[in-house]
Amino acid sequence: MQRNPSTLYKLRILRGLLRVHPIELLFVFIMVVLYLFYSLVIRDFLSVVLLSILLGSWLVSRPSEWLARGISNLGLHLGLSEYTIGILSSLTAISGEILIVSLSLYVAYITGHYELIIFAILVILYSISFNILTLGLIVSFRGGKKITVPDEILSKELEILDWAVVAIFLISFLWIARKFLFPVTSDIIYLPREVAFILPVCYVVYMVHIRKIKLTARTGLSSKPTLSITHSILLTLIGTIAVIIGGNLITDAAISLVMGGMKIFEQLGNPLIITALIVGAASAIYDATINLIFSARGQLLTSVGNLIGSALQLLLLVIGIVGIIIPIPLTEYVIFQLIAIGMSLYFFRQAIADRGLDPYEGAMIVLFQFFIFVVAVRGF
């Protein structure tokens, strides 16, 4: 007689822990049913791919918040510093991108499918572009008159932005020189591993110095855990498993498109770029969602910092680490998107140079990202 009340009680605790709205649960249930129906009964390729991306996007985005909350509380229980907890939490924002890229590179290594390596790199680069697009939307519609950027933040951000922009253009000039000025015998030009190694080193140096910034609410973390250690571990495990499942769903769908189903997009533009664009958007949903929530609460500067922080993590940390493990092919697609990101970061750098961001600058950032997407899809 006590089993049912006990089970219901545990389900209520779990629901309260996950903070999932009933409408959200209904959406996930419908997606799972449709996915199983189309994959096992109808077996329609395009429907299965689209449902995999939709369901995978939710599993990559929503559980990342559970993972961040679980890790934050675990860190407080273990006595880690606020700074360390902040870094660990921020890395969960790009856990989806890291997983999708890792799986794509693994399949590329196993199968020898060269295009999957290019696809994995493009996913990272398009995810950065979608972060910048979200930033522009927030500034445009939630920025009010102006978002003020404090001098102490400005002094550190301008340097890392300048460094990133110059690094991108040096890589691009390397490709131009080896492709046209001093042609090499091989058709494929790779990013040297030594160059890739310096990228994460730069990010570490940046993080060491950025920790010195003193703000009244620099991380939004409380000094005491809000969850028990059991609930923290449970939330971390559930978030990790869900992100892995979501990453697998998105990666399988993307690999199916890259290796056999890209003819679907041929009339729209370059199939490889369109596929990478879709997956990049799907993997960036968590960043977009969490920062739209921050902006709705009035934490506009937090949103700006998170989005640029994630963009720099992906560019310097993820690209750098991937480049150390596997030589990154510098194709015209990769170089174009690198230059586009460099110009976007430079545009943002010029926008915050006057110690603030206004809606006009946000609108220009949004339009510039759409311009980049259209040129990439229709131009190649």
Image (tube, helix red, strand yellow):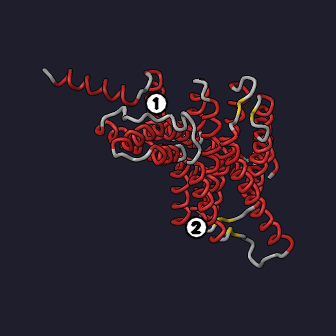
Report if residue 43 is visible in the image: yes
Image position of 121 with respect to 182: above or below = above
Image position of 211 with respect to 133: above or below = below
Q: Which mark is residue 88?
A: none
Front in this rendered view, residue 354 or 14:
354
What is the crowding at mark 2: few (fewer than 14 residues within 10 Å), some, or many (at least 20)?
Answer: many
Front in this rendered view, residue 172 or 82:
82
Q: Secondary structure at mark 2?
A: helix
What is the crowding at mark 1: few (fewer than 14 residues within 10 Å), some, or many (at least 20)?
Answer: some
The amino acid at mark 2 is: Ile
Q: Is residue 297 left or right of residue 67?
A: right
How many angstroms separate mark 2 from mark 1 (CA)? 38 Å
Asked if disc 2 and disc 1 are in contact, CB closer than 8 Å, the reply is: no
Look at discs 2 and 1 and give the one toward the viewer: 2
Residue 73: x percent and y percent?
A: 38, 39
Residue hosting label 2: 324
| Upstream in sequence: badge 2 or badge 1 | 1
Q: Secondary structure at mark 1?
A: helix
Residue at screen point 61% across, 27% down: 295
Residue 64: x percent and y percent?
A: 48, 40
Image position of 165 with respect to 303: above or below = below
Quarter of the picture containing the N terminus is top left
Q: Residue furthest right?
A: 181
Residue at screen point 71% across, 64% down: 330
Residue at screen point 25% across, 23% down: 9
Residue hosting label 1: 28
Residue 343: x percent and y percent?
A: 79, 49
The amino acid at mark 1 is: Val
Residue at screen point 76% across, 41% down: 369
Residue 326: x percent and y percent?
A: 58, 67
Q: Residue furthest bottom?
A: 185
Front in this rendered view, residue 228 or 320:
228
